[in-house]
Amino acid sequence: MAGSAGLITLETSQKRFARLMALPGMIVLILLVVGPLVYMFANSFMLKTLATPLPPRFAWFKNYGDLFTDGRFWNAFLNSMIIMVVGIPVQSVLALIIALLLNKKFPGSKIVVALFLIPVMITPVVAGFEWKIILDNRFGPLNFVLSFFGVAPLAWLAKPALAMASILIMDTWQWTPFVTIVLLAGLAAIPKQVYEASSVDGSTARETLWRVTMPLLRPMFTLVVLLRIIFIFKIFDPVQILTGGGPGISTETLGLLTYIIGFKNFNVGMSATIAVVQLIIITVIAKLFITLVMNRREGKQ
Amino acid sequence: MNTIALNREDIARRKRVRMIFTVLRFALILIFLAIFLFPVYWIAVGAFKGEGEFYHYPPVFWPSHFDFGNFLRGMTIFGGTQGLITSLIVAVTNTVLVIGFGVLLAYGMGRFKVGGDNMSFFVLSLLFAPPVVATMPLFIIWKTLKLLDTLPVLFLSYILINMPFAVWVMKGFFEDIPHGIENAALLDGYSRFHAFRKYVLPLAIPGIAVTALFVFIFSWNEFLFALIFTRSRTQTLPITLAGMTGGHQIPWGEISALSLIAILPGIILTLFFQKYLVRGLTFGAVKG
């Protein structure tokens, strides 16, 4: 009895010590976050620009109303959605094919997987430049390769639909390897016996894929889709370099629009408003992530 | 007799089918590999191309002679050296700050649930938030403090980008260490800090090192904050690169040369720490 009581006090004093150690980090984080956050919320209710000398004016929800009736906001919202709705499924299918190809180990398979992953860590600015060179309508290698298939040179970055396609191609190049490695980890976690049982039952390879592999990979797909949604909300550098949102506003994403409102139009109030809207969406996704990914994992352990 | 012959034929046929599948599989792997590595190849050869070779049709897949002038001009007249040095200073300092502040917070959160679920949710939300939302408030704050275009502004701003990541991933590494190690050390009469330093920390070092590498690369690759918070004095390499398109003819050779330098740390991390890449990029959700 005395012993266990002693252990409990040990534990609480240990926790007090841990709290003390965590304090500096917490203070740094909270100082850096809470200040700007409060300031941003306040600004989202103000008419305030850096472009005119007019004093800022409190305007309740006027910025929010203006934002939600602004075609340019919905254009950017739609573009971000297109990258998600088209990009994520394409990348998932491609990644699944590559993961299935790489799943069975062979000599050198580790190196091959590592090589596949290189695009993920490429400096985003460089990725933007690289695709600008590759997609060049006159001298780019892509149009050159397409010419063998009888495709006339495409003005990739000059036409709205093609510019959007360019961004999707770049995004798919950079992120399919990431999806692949997550699915590979999922495939590696499926016990061999499951496949053996399936083959004893006389299932064909296709049946095994749909009835055994895919359901077991579902948690990985959930994880990947959520993370990709988060990454697409964050996307900025490669799009800024590749198209700059153009031609016109045809490839403007939410991230780009936030930047343009703030630092091209100097509209502080509106920039804060669109930031708040994005933070609310992201908070919902973070909650989803915790319930669908983190809690599920803890439940298993 | 007959059935055995049939079986033999059957086995031979199966073997052939399996052979075809294996060949097909490796062919597909090679094709995918070629497609995904092509842009990296294009940067690498571009770095050695002569200027005219960028404006040549059909495109030049292998430079006629390897020209190191791109590196030379990129590093000198295009300001690559300054960008490189600034990038190194910023990335190293930021890594030290983030790991220094983050490791103790991660320890507290991972092993003693300091701050509980709310703290976890707070850190995760920060990790998921698009950095662009913080640019305007930070810009005004840095401007008021007259810190724009100085190194400290990048040190501080990058903490915001990288600390949530580092804390979250290191927290996972601390959770993996068996519980009660501290208690054993305490019962042996060691101080609490000693228990942390001598018993827990050594087990967490590999995880901390990998997290530090990630933080280094994220700072090294960062573009948006540097674009907004710096002018000429503290340009990092990505900003130098982005600024090179200003003239009326774009110097693709020099851009490729500096790009090649810029992507090297990321490639090295990928090739040598592949094991931890899934874990880092999924924020610890997949242990890999």
Image (cartoon, coloured by chain):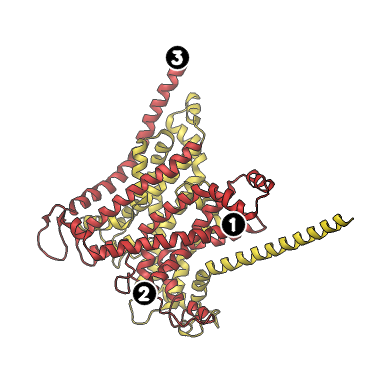
The answer to whether residue B269 is above or below residue A135 is above
> Dot 3, crowdedness within 10 Å: few (<14), some or many (≥20)?
few
Q: CA distance from mark 2 to mark 1?
A: 42 Å
- Res B244 label: 2
The answer to whether residue B82 is above or below residue A38 is below
From the image, tell me which residue sits under label 3. A2
Q: Chain of mark 2?
A: B
Q: Tell me the amino acid under the disc marked 3.
A: Ala
Q: Give the residue drawn at x 29%, y 54%.
A: A278
Q: CA distance from mark 3 to mark 1?
A: 57 Å
Q: Tell me the amino acid under the disc marked 2.
A: Met
- In the image, B270 versus A172, the foreground residue is A172
User: Which is more N-terminal, label 1 or label 3?
Assistant: 3
Q: Give the residue drawn at x 40%, y 43%.
A: A290
From the image, tell me which residue sits under label 1. A100
Residue B264, percent from left and from top: 49, 64
Of badges 3 and 1, the one in the foreground is 1
